[in-house]
Amino acid sequence: MPTWHKALDQAPKEGTMVEVEIKGLKLFVTLNNGKLYCAENRCPHEDIELTLGCLKGNRVKCSLHGYSFDLATGDSSEADVDNMLTYPVKQENNEIYIEV
């Protein structure tokens, strides 16, 4: 059963990605256009950390091959590349929590 875990003492700065690890899962949290997102910090295509890439609009772009993934849904830019795994994230009293 999924439970909420404290991930950060405060939200990341707008437009940045912060790596966190919860229950052995390597994740990232980002604040993009005022909204928090959380996803697995691994490109489904080549297993490289997505935090090595960059944010473009509402997508994270992988630094290796340029594939991008929707921050809200995880949808891949390419039909033959798996979607990115996303996780619920919330802020309470400045602290950031992720549901895993």
Image: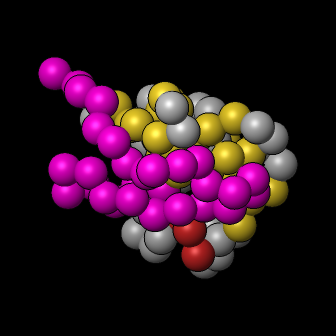
For the question of whether residue 34 can be seen, the reply is: yes
For the question of whether residue 67 can be seen, the reply is: no
Horizontal side of residue 72 vs 43, given as left or right:
right
Q: Is residue 19 left or right of residue 60?
A: left
Q: Quadrant of residue 75?
A: top right
Frontmost residue, 85 versus 34:
34
**Residue at 38%, 48% in the rendered image:** 7
The C terminus lies in which quarter of the figure? top left
- What's the magenta region? 1-28
The answer to if 25 sits in the magenta stretch is: yes
- Which residue is situated farthest in the front direction here? 93
> Which colour scheme appears in the figure?
secondary structure
Which x, y percent locates residue 89? 48, 33
For the residue pair 38 and 92, the one nearer the viewer reads as: 92
Left or right: residue 86 compared with residue 70: left
Residue at image x 40%, y 37%? 97
Residue 44 position, x and y percent, is 45, 57
Query: Residue 18, how many percent across, how many down?
Result: 53, 62
Q: In the figure, 3 relative to 9: above or below? A: above
